[in-house]
Amino acid sequence: MNKDDNISEEQLNAFVDGELESEERSCLFNEAERSEELDQRLCQQRKLKELVKHAYKDVPAPKRLLAGGRTGTGMVGLGVAASLLLVLGLTAGMFMRGLFEPAASPGSNTALGNAQSVAATENYILHVVSGEPQQMRLALQKAEELLSTASSGHPRQVEVVANERGLDLLRSDVTLFSDEISALAKEEVIFYACSKAIQRLEEKGVEVQLVPEAIPGYTALDRVVIRMKDGWQYVKI
Amino acid sequence: MAAKKLFGISQRRAFKRLVSNNRERLYRMAYSWTGNPHLADDLVQQTMLKALRNQKQLRDFAAAEGWLFRILANCLTDYRRAKRELQSADDIEIIEKVTPEHQFNDEQLVRRVRRAVQKLPINHRQVVTLVDLEEFSYASVAQILDIPVGTVMSRLCRGRRALRQHLLEIRPQKSSRTAANIKRIK
C-alpha cells in the first residue's frame, strides 16, 4: 500500500492550517519529499487556501465602512464630500415633505428577504444637530413615537445620528437623557455618534466620553446619505 | 452604579475601540458568508450593537475577537432563521459592480472563487472562511460556531473538497478518510 494513502484529507488540512505539532509536520514534509502525489496534494490544498484568501482580499465595502478612519485629503476628498452634501441637500428636500409619514404601501414590498424594500416604507434616520435640550428631547420622543406607530408585522428601524452640538446628546458626561437613550436602545433604536464631531472636540482638547449605547466610527453625513439611499425617511432635528 | 464599577470607563472605551477596529474584518467575513454587501453591513452593525450592549458578558478581553465573530455568526443564524432559510445557494446573487476590469483574469478568478464559496452549504462556508480568511485555529472556530473541533475538521474537509472540485478541476480524492490518523492537534 502506498504510504500516501495513509495521509487523510484532515491531515492535509491540518498541515496547511498550521494545526499539526512539529513532529507530525516534519513527518509529512518527509513523506512529501518521497511522494510526488502527496506533494501535489499538499500544493493543491495550499493553493486552495490562498485562492480563498485572495478572493476576499478586497471586498466591496459600503462607503460608510470607510468613514471615521483616515480619509483622503485634498481636492479629491473635498470633491467627494461636496458631492455627498449636494446629494444630501437635494434628497433631504424631497424627504422633508413627508416627515413622519410612511411613503409607500407595504404591499409594494417584493419579498421578505429584501430588507431595502421594507426599509423604503418603514424606517427612519433622525439627525440631531442641535445642542438644545428641548430639541434633543423632541428627537427621542419622535424615535419613541415612530416605534410605537409601526405597522404590525413590519418592525420599524430607527437610527439616531448626532453631530455638531447634537453630539452632546450622546456624551455620557453631558447628556441629560441617558435613561431615555438606554430605554430606546433596548427597543432596538441605534445611536451613532459622528466620528468627525468627536474628532473636532478632541482636537480642542475635550475628552469625549459616550454613553454605552452610542456607536462611534461613522460620520453623520455618510450615515444619513447611506440610509437615504436605502430608502429611509430622513428627519433633521 | 454597580455596572460602571465592574466595567470601568477606560475599559469601555478600550472595548469600543476594539469593536470599531474589527469592523472591517467582521464585514469581510459577513460578506464572504452572504455574498451581499448590504446584508453584510447590516449584520456587522447588529454585531457591533450587540457587542457594545453585552460587553459586560465578556470575561476575558484577550478572547474578544473570537467573541465578536461568534456574535456575527449568531446574527447570521438569527437572520436565516427569521427568513426561514429562503435562499438556496443557486438563488444567491453575488452583488458586484460590473466594470470593464472584469475582463481581466484576476477579476474573473475572484468572481469564480467567490461563486464557489457561495455554493458551499453555509455551515461549510463559515468554517472555510473563518480558517482561511481570519486564520482562526480549529479550536477557536469551534468556540465561535459552538461546535466540536471534530465537526470543524469534517466541515472544513467537505468544504475544501467541494471547492477543489469547482476550482482546481482535479478528480476528487478517493475517500474521506477518518481523522483518527491525526495524532495531535495544537
Image: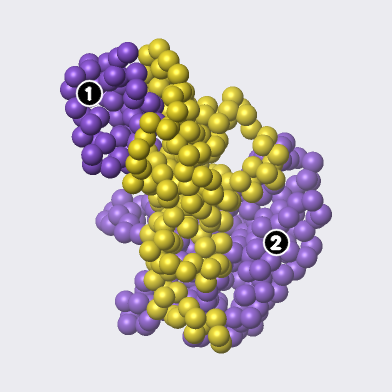
Chain colours: A purple, B yellow
Question: x, y (%) of residue A178?
Answer: 59, 81
Question: x, y (%) of residue A40?
Answer: 27, 19
Q: Callout 1, which amino acid?
A: Ala
- Chain containing mark 2: A
- Determine the secondary structure under disc 2: loop
- Chain containing mark 1: A
Residue A74 found in image quarter: bottom left
Name the one closer to the observer, A75 or A66: A66
Is residue B126 visible from the viewing direction of this image? yes
Q: CA distance from mark 2 to mark 1?
A: 69 Å
What residue does disc 1 label? A32
Mark 1 and mark 2 in contact (Cβ < 8 Å)?
A: no
Question: x, y (%) of residue B86?
Answer: 68, 34
Q: Outermost residue toward the front? A: A1
Q: Callout 2, which amino acid?
A: Leu
Side (left or right) of A46 relative to A227? left
The residue drawn where x is 51% and y is 60% is B48
The answer to whether tags 2 and 1 share a subunit is yes
Above or below for A167 versus B88: below
- Determine the secondary structure under disc 1: helix
Q: So how many labels did they put on this image?
A: 2
Residue B128 found in image quarter: top left
The residue drawn where x is 23% and y is 39% is A23
Q: Residues within 10 Å of mark 1 (few under 14, many from 20)?
A: some
Side (left or right) of A30 relative to B137? left
What residue does disc 2 label? A99
The residue drawn where x is 72% and y is 70% is A144
